[in-house]
Image (cartoon, helix red, strand yellow):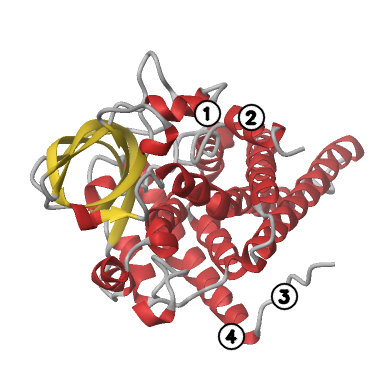
């Protein structure tokens, strides 16, 4: 039986993050949700950078905290309790640096990882998605085949790599020090010709496109990015030649529990708000019928949140042990997303008309939970992956 325990130091860190989340992150996140996400806001990243939590899994040798996945998911849950968008900023940072940690050269690690651990906030982003009428990976029924149809290409010219293409839905894109991009060889559409590259933000030809005004997680700035003959040294290729597909699977397999932890945090925030409203308005004491409806709903919400958290912890445990974690990781995200969406919907129903009012925390939780359906892949995509593992 896995032992889901953390040491005293890690538990204290989680407690400190909880305090930061409820005292500062929640308020700033609500403000950013109201004003929209047209511009990058650095306030929440500044809070987290001071605690070295923008990239908490980076090993100590590069300046990071070197947190286990178990500890990292707990941290993400606490941040998401305050604001799901803020948690998404950290998670996308981790997605982007994962290829470097797995197969990046020591030179690239030394050059780019320490800044992500500085007291002044630094971010990174991962550019994978391409949405065209012919190819939408998030909705694909054949993800392993359709990934080869991406249009972003890489061409070797002397000792330089020239990148061309457009990527959609890039979180942190306009605020990042560097972009990790998936591209295919210009001459081939085979999985063996997929590759990941690190592109510094100031590279000529790297363009930040339109800002995507999202329904939820509006504190996470999201853009379209273009590569127009963006030229980088060959040494900025990450991993072995043709290793892009392997890295892509590892990014998702290893980090899916982090996205699931956002779902647990959002669900928990909605549950705690609903419980507070129910007690304040004496819903649990007013009459028998109302009492039974509300109390039953609260029990269901609490039970599902605990179950989702356990699914996340199980996946994190397997990742830390490097033990056949893919199935557990995808299951955790699939289930936590459902729990977050059911819980936030139930919260709005119990709270009533105020919960449907723009600016009320409950409706923000509802919108944030819906965003989980497409971050790191849709439910349909996850089922496709899981169907091959059962």
Q: Looking at the image, is 260 positioned above or below residue 107? A: above
Q: Earlier in the sequence, mark 2 or mark 3?
A: 3
Which quadrant would the N terminus be assigned to in this image? bottom right
Q: Residues within 10 Å of mark 1 (few under 14, many from 20)?
A: some
The x and y percentages for residue 261 are 59, 54
Q: Earlier in the sequence, mark 2 or mark 1?
A: 1
Q: Are marks 2 and 1 in contact (CB under 8 Å)?
A: yes
Task: Determine the CA span between mark 4 and mark 3.
Answer: 12 Å
Q: Looking at the image, is 266 positioned above or below residue 98? A: above
Q: Nearer the viewer, residue 157 or 85?
A: 157
Q: Which residue is mark 4?
A: 9
Q: Are marks 2 and 3 in contact (CB under 8 Å)?
A: no
**Helix, strand or loop at disc 3?**
loop
Q: Earlier in the sequence, mark 1 or mark 4?
A: 4
Q: Which mark is residue 5?
A: 3
Q: Earlier in the sequence, mark 1 or mark 3?
A: 3
Which quadrant would the C terminus be assigned to in this image? top right
Task: Determine the CA span between mark 1 and mark 3.
Answer: 36 Å
Q: Nearer the viewer, residue 218 or 116?
A: 116
In the shown orientation, is residue 61 left or right of residue 154? right
Task: Determine the CA span between mark 1 and mark 4.
Answer: 41 Å
């Amino acid at each position: 039986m896995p032992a889901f325990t953390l040491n005293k130091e890690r538990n204290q860190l989680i407690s400190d993050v909880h305090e930061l989340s409820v005292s500062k992150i929640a308020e700033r996140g609500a403000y950013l949700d109201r004003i929209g996400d047209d511009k990058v806001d650095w306030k929440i990243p500044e809070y987290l950078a001071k605690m070295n939590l923008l990239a908490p899994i980076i090993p100590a040798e590069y300046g990071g905290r070197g947190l286990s996945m178990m500890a990292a998911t707990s941290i993400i849950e606490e941040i998401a309790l305050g604001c799901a968008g803020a948690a998404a900023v950290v998670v996308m940072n981790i997605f982007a640096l994962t290829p470097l940690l797995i197969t990046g050269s020591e030179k690239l690690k030394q050059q780019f990882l320490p800044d992500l651990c500085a007291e002044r906030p630094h971010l990174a982003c991962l550019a994978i998605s391409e949405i065209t009428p012919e190819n939408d990976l998030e909705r694909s029924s054949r993800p392993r085949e359709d990934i080869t149809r991406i249009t972003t290409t890489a061409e070797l010219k002397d000792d330089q790599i020239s990148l061309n293409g457009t990527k959609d839905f890039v979180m942190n894109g306009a605020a990042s020090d560097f972009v990790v991009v998936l591209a295919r060889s210009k001459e081939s559409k085979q999985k063996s010709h997929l590759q990941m590259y690190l592109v510094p933000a100031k590279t000529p030809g790297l363009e930040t496109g339109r800002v995507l005004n999202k329904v939820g997680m509006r504190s996470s700035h999201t853009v379209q990015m273009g590569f127009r003959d963006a030229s980088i040294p060959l040494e900025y290729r990450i991993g072995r030649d043709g290793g892009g597909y392997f890295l892509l699977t590892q990014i998702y397999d290893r980090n899916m529990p982090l996205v699931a932890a956002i779902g647990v945090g959002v669900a928990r925030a909605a549950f705690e708000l609903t419980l507070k409203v129910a007690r304040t308005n004496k819903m649990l004491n007013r009459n028998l019928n109302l009492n039974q409806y509300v109390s039953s709903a609260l029990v269901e919400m609490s039970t599902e949140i605990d179950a989702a958290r356990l699914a996340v912890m199980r996946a994190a445990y397997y990742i830390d042990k490097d033990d056949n974690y893919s199935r557990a990781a995808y299951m955790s995200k699939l289930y936590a997303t459902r729990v977050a969406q059911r819980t936030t919907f139930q919260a709005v129903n119990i709270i009533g008309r105020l919960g449907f009012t723009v600016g009320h925390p409950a409706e923000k939780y509802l919108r944030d939970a819906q965003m989980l359906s497409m971050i790191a892949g849709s439910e349909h995509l996850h089922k496709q992956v899981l169907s091959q593992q059962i």
